[in-house]
Amino acid sequence: MTWKKRYLKVTNFLFIILLLLQLLPDQVSKEPHTSYLVWFVVGVEVLVLILSTVIKKQEGLNLFTDIIGFLYGLLIVWTLATAKGNWLNPALFPTPGQVFYQFVEDIDKILVNIKSSVGIILEGYLLAAAVAIPLGLFLGWGARLGSAATYISKFLGAIPPIVYIPYGIALLPTFRSVAVFVIFLATFWPVLAGTMSGVLNVEKRLIDSAKVLNVNKFTMLFSVILPASLPQIFIGCNQGLGVSFILLTSAEMIGARDGLGYYVKQYSDFGDYTRTIVGLLVIGIVVVVISFLFNKLQNYLLRWKR
């Protein structure tokens, strides 16, 4: 790529516009903390320039700069609507600088809540996957049993796991155990259904080829059928992951004493919408990061398809 394709992009011009916008007078009475916004976008732009030098594939660079360009555009509109134009109610819509300032001030508290939420997600999700995948393999192995189990899993999976929270609170000793139980249910049924679907739809020629080689049942299941079923298994895992985050934040807003959902609910109850927006943004970032890592794992395990 030429240096123009690397460094002369719309994203870079949006960065300059965003910086020049900060020279306009502020229209809000409360301190807008413009310096925090400036330091943030400068840091992002330094990262853009570094990656523009390192990334060799045009498609990967374009995707990254397009995402950052969207971020810059959002910050431009946000700044105009709040700090520079004061078009929105400042009590409900803080300036970008105020949000970044509050994030820095609450970073220790935010990290504790992230640790709590991610810990619950991982515990319930991994436990459900560890149970659902082997069970789905064995149920799907028998065509007759697998067909019946598919309908049963669809019926039970259609029940929203959040309705089990009252029973979990009555039966389990702590809210964390209740949350893990809900995440387990949210993940178990999609993964079980995806695994059984994958097993039932494995190409017959693969199984016949393995039988010709006289492989035993254990090897057949975990060395032939499991790899062939992985695409369907990952579909179920993706569904479970998405639902798990929704249920966790909902559960934390009901009865937790820590976690990202609790952070948002606590400060929204007190009308602190700056911290509320901080919590919403952090939840979005955590979900995106975990989804990105999960997709990397999926691409690695399914690399044979390419």
Image (cartoon, rainbow, N blue to C red):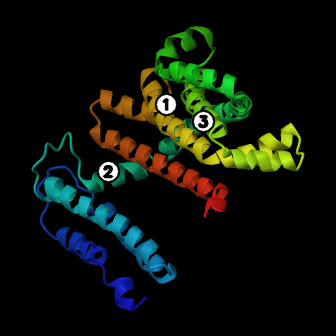
Query: Dot 1 corresponds to which residue?
Result: 248
Q: Mark 2 vs mark 1: which is more N-terminal? A: 2
Which quadrant is the N terminus positioned in?
bottom left
Q: Which amino acid type is shown beneath numbered disc 3?
A: Ser
Q: Is residue 298 above or below residue 161?
A: below
Q: Which amino acid type is shown beneath numbered disc 2?
A: Val
Residue at disc 3, secondary structure: helix
- Expressed as whole percent of the image width and height from the top left, the position of residue 235 reads 54, 43
Q: Characterize the local packing of mark 1: few (<14), some (14-19) or many (20 or more) Cα atoms within 10 angstroms.
A: many
Q: Identify the residue at horizontal 13%, vertical 46% (top origin).
A: 88
- Expressed as whole percent of the image width and height from the top left, the position of residue 274 reads 30, 43
Query: Dot 2 corresponds to which residue?
Result: 99
- Expressed as whole percent of the image width and height from the top left, the position of residue 164 reads 51, 15
Q: Quadrant of residue 13?
A: bottom left
Q: Which amino acid type is shown beneath numbered disc 1?
A: Leu
User: Do the residues under discs 2 and 1 have CB atoms within 8 angstroms?
Assistant: no
The extreme top residue here reads 170
